[in-house]
Amino acid sequence: MAQSVISNTSDQKLLFRALSRVSRRNRLQLSQLEYRDYLEFKDYVQAKYGAKLDEAQVRSYLRSVFHPIEDHVHRIQDEIWDTELTQPISPHAATGWSKVDREILEMRDQFRAARSEQAHSSIGNSCNRILHFLSEAAFIPDRHLPAGEALPPVAKTKHRFDLIIERELAQSNQASLRKFARAAVELAEAVKHGSTPSRMDAGIAADGVIVLVNIMRRISEDARTRRQ
């Protein structure tokens, strides 16, 4: 198949056109090429380097044209790694809690654009909004509230998460997950109230909240399955 692409002039022209379009889309100014298929390339190289093709010169020319493209693609990949928050290990694209899902999507956009301490602090605000919506969505009073205990406000996220964990998880797993849930809440608070939060601070807090959301979704789904 690859051989037919190389030998087919129309396919070669299509590949060059695709390269040009993708380069523009990724903010890369591609040099104006003097050829659009192998035959045109061969004529161009012969005119540039003489009738006798020097393979070393040809390779050097190709590197000068295409290596900057490769380097630019690598830089874009590095930017993606630096600007994207964690993705859950889950077949689900969303939790099903509409407010939580919407806030997470907005926080992802915020984080991609955040470049200042003020913007990083705003990530902390978003983390806290998500935690409040999660507290509202995941906590089921009839199931998670112990008899005789007053209903904790939505803002008391640590307490609500503790009660969910105590009700739904085996005793052996409760302590570790309770520590994680509390840490996620505290990291979000630290970024929200910090005077100079860094991008790393904001990213860690946001990743922690996203992981906690998906843990709570997994716990809720398991509990629902067991009740059926």
Image (cartoon, rainbow, N blue to C red):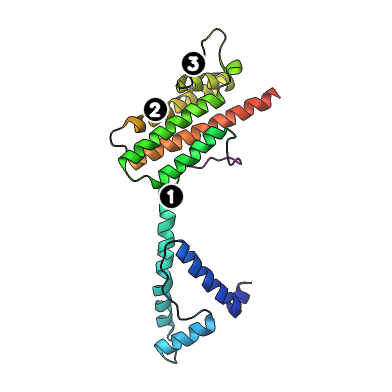
Are the residues at dot 2 and dot 1 in contact (C-beta closer than 8 Å)? no
Label 2 packing within 10 angstroms: few (<14), some (14-19), many (20+): some
Is 90 covered by the magenta stretch?
yes
Which residue is labeled 2 in the image? 186
Identify which amino acid the numbered label 1 is placed on. Trp
Q: Is residue 214 visible?
A: no
Crowd rating for badge 1 (residues with CA inside 10 Å; few <14, some 14–19, many 20+):
few
- Residue at the far top: name it: 148
Quarter occupied by residue 12: bottom right
Which of the marked residues, 2 or 1, is nearer the chain's N terminus?
1
The quadrant the C terminus occupies is top right
Which quadrant would the N terminus be assigned to in this image? bottom right
Kindly state the secondary structure of the residue where label 1 is placed: helix
Q: Residue furthest right?
A: 228
Residue under the point 58% across and 22% down: 168
* Residue 9 forms part of the magenta stretch: no
Q: Secondary structure at mark 3?
A: loop
Which residue in the structure is indicated by mark 3? Answer: 152
Name the outermost residue toward the left. Answer: 195
Image height check: is 57 above or below 189? below
Q: Secondary structure at mark 2?
A: helix
- N-terminal label among 1 and 3: 1
Nearer-the-camera pick, 56 or 154: 154
Q: Amino acid at mark 3?
A: Pro
Q: Residue at x 53, y 69 (%)?
A: 18
- Other residues around mark 3 within 10 Å, as few (<14) / some (14–19) / many (≥20): some
Q: Which residues are magenta?
A: 85-94
